[in-house]
Image (cartoon, rainbow, N blue to C red):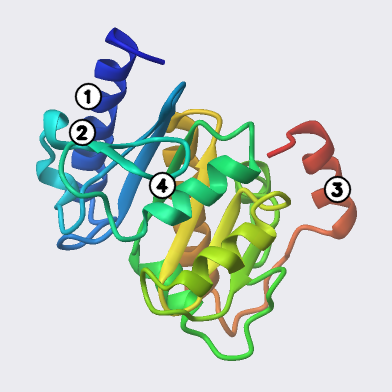
Amino acid sequence: MTGASESKAREAIVEHGKSLHQRGFVPGSSGNISVRLADGFLVTPTRSCLGRLDPARIAKLDLNGTHVSGDPASKEAFLHAQMYSKRQDANAVVHLHSTHAVAVSCLRDLSEEQPIRPLTPYFVMQIGRLKVLPYFPPGDEELAHAVAAVAEDHHAILLANHGPVVAGSGLDAAVCAIEELEEAARLDLLLDGRSVNELTAAQVATLQKRFPS
C-alpha cells in the first residue's frame, strides 16, 4: 500500500479513532491504532487522543519498527510490530483501554486461555481464543517478548491490568473484533454470579471451524 492507498489508510485511522473515542472505548489519550503498508506500517502518535487525530501527523514506521515520518509513534508501537512480524494475515492492529475488557484484565485468578466465557457465538466468531499475558509496564521491552511468543497463535491478546490488543485482516475487521471483545467482557461481568448457559465445547468447535478467526 503506497501513495493513494497510504492516504486512505491515514483517513481510515482518523475515522475509526474518532468513532471509538466518541463512543467511550478510549478515554483520554489512551489506545493506539495501526495499519500495515507494503514498506512498514502507520501507527497513531504517542500521547495523542484518538478522537482528534491529524492524518498527516500519524507516525510511519518501517518493517523493523524504525521511525520514518510523522510524529513520534506510540510507545506501544512494538505491540503492533510484533503482531505484523508473527502474523502475515494481520493488516491492522487495535489496542484499547476499554472499560469492561480492562476490568476483566484486573481480576485475580483469571484463566490465561479463557478469561471471558463463551456466552455468544459472536465472541467465538470474532475473537476465538483470547490469550492473557501477565502485567508489564506500558512500553516495557519484556512485554514485547511476551507478545511475540503468543502472537502467531492468537490474534487477540488481553494484557493484564492494561487492556486488549486485536489484529485483523483489515482495519474494519480489527475494530469490529475488539468491539465484540468489549461487549463480551461487559456481558460476562454483568452476568457474574448468575447461572448462565455457556456455549458447549462442541458448539464452540463448530463455530471455529465454520468461522475461523
The residue that mark 1 highlights is 11
The Cα–Cα distance between marks 2 and 3, rounded to whole angstroms, is: 36 Å
Quadrant in which the N terminus is drawn: top left
Q: Earlier in the sequence, mark 2 or mark 3?
A: 2
Are circles 1 and 4 on residues that touch, CB within 8 Å? no
> Mark number for residue 94?
4
The secondary element bearing badge 4 is classed as strand
Q: Which residue lies under the disc numbered 2?
A: 14
Q: Is residue 110 visible?
A: yes
In terms of sequence position, does the residue under pointer 1 or pointer 3 come before the other? 1
CA separation in Å, label 1 and label 3: 37 Å
Up/down of 5 relative to 195, above or below: above
Q: Amino acid at mark 2?
A: Val
Residue type beneath disc 1: Glu
Residue sitting at 22 percent across and 31 percent down? 15
Amino acid type of the residue that numbered disc 4 sits on in the rendered structure = Val
Q: Nearer the viewer, mark 3 or mark 4?
A: 4
Distance of label 2 from label 1 (alpha carbons): 5 Å
Q: Amino acid at mark 3?
A: Ala
Q: Earlier in the sequence, mark 3 or mark 4?
A: 4
Residue at (70% x, 49% y) in the render: 152
Label 2 crowd bin: few (<14), some (14–19), many (20+), radius 10 Å: many
